[in-house]
Amino acid sequence: MNIDSITSTLLQLDVELPSWAFGNSGTRFKVFAQPGVPRTPYEKIDDAAQVHRYTGSAPSVALHIPWDKVEDYAELRRHAEQRGVRLGTINANVFQDDDYRLGSVTNPDPLIRKKAVAHLLDCIDVMDQTGSRDLKLWFSDGTNYPGQDNIRARQDRLAEALHAVYARLGDDQRLILEYKLFEPAFYTMDVPDWGTSFAHCLELGERAKVCVDTGHHAPGTNIEFIVAFLLRAGKLGAFDFNSRFYADDDLMVGSADPFQLFRILHEVSQGDGFDPRTEVAFMLDQCHNIEPKIPGQIRSVMNVQEAAAKALLVDTDALQRMQNAGDVLGANAVLMDAYNTDVRPMLAEHRRNLGLDPDPMAAYAASGYAQQIVAERVGGSPAGWGA
Ligand SMILES: [Mn+2]
């Protein structure tokens, strides 16, 4: 691909930011509070808009309900638009009530299942007001001990809930089902892997798709294979990008294993996933526990752009020739040539052409915004993992 078509593809590559990345977060051991952290969904959007301002590639913000519950979503939507961004994916949250100790939509108690489904339907009402396309579902549901509950019955309850939610979607709305190998449940998760998500989505219909959270697999899982398979099947709905060394670490995308991110985005490129018509949502799902949050998000967007640029640099004609000729080393060399290219000068030039600072990290640091929010955001409760 030549430089012009690479930059035009990069222009279309929008990375959605998670509102929760801007709030305080931590591990189960400690949350380190940072000064200047947003206290309201409005302030989270203000911070997200900064990331877009310096990268030009983060025009939407995903919300988490109820963490981002507001009185008037139309007003929040206008607030976002005034800041130059829009509201994106609505992430449902059925994992924080005491009622959900034994599960939400798969709970053995039908009343608790009903409560969970009601929340999911409420989230669609929110989507109608925010103009969001996607409802992202991740369930913490599962069991800790063999025999604790009937694995098959839990799948039936899951399917029933998903059907109820799917039936309520508008014509332009999608259900995105995320999976996770383990945690918080340690014996079985009800949606542990892409195959389970894929099977439920197939049964639901066209507008149900799989979310690949890069941190939700067993160590050593070949994520790019999953991506290639789902794209081929038309079932890759979204990415939740982050990095992991051990479990669901939620570190900055591209920080732990940039080569893996490149391999994933190479499959995206091969499967036309960068074409907006393929409707793959590229989202960050991260927490910045010890590093400053806005620069952490800026760096993450840049990491996605760098890996995408390298993936787009792959000489696909040469690659195919080598593959067809059975030239193992030649084919591998074509891929590695692209990966080993320093694309940073190209991206700096791309930003200059857009009227952006070629160095988003430095430009944000020089803006004074970090000092401004520390001075202004006094009083109130900093946002975190709660409503
Ligand atoms: Mn996720």
Image (cartoon, grey):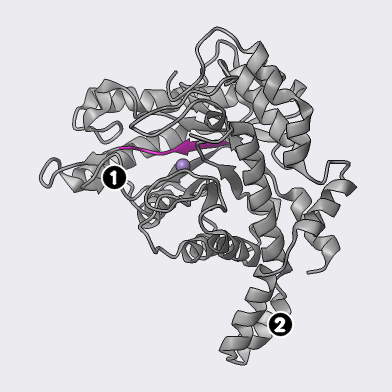
Q: Position of residue 35 (x, y in %)?
A: 57, 20
Residue under numbered circle 1: 190
Q: Please say if 59 is above or below 192.
A: above
Look at the numbered disc 1 and give the secondary structure of its residue: loop
Left/right of residue 96 with respect to residue 348 in the rendered view: left
Q: Judge the density around disc 2: few (<14), some (14-19), many (≥20) Cα neighbours within 10 Å.
A: some
Q: Position of residue 162 (x, y in %)?
A: 38, 38
Observer-nearest of 51 and 217: 51
The x, y position of residue 271, in whole percent, is 61, 64
Helix or strand or loop: what does disc 2 sit on? helix
Residue drawn at x 65%, y 44% is 299
Left/right of residue 380 with respect to residue 131 in the rendered view = left
Residue 84's quadrant in the figure?
top right
Residue 55 visible in image: no
Q: Which residues are magenta?
A: 134-140
Q: Is residue 353 left or right of residue 176?
A: right
Q: Amino acid at mark 2?
A: Ala
Counting from the top left corner in percent of width and height, residue 174 is at: 54, 40
**Label 2 belongs to which residue?**
318
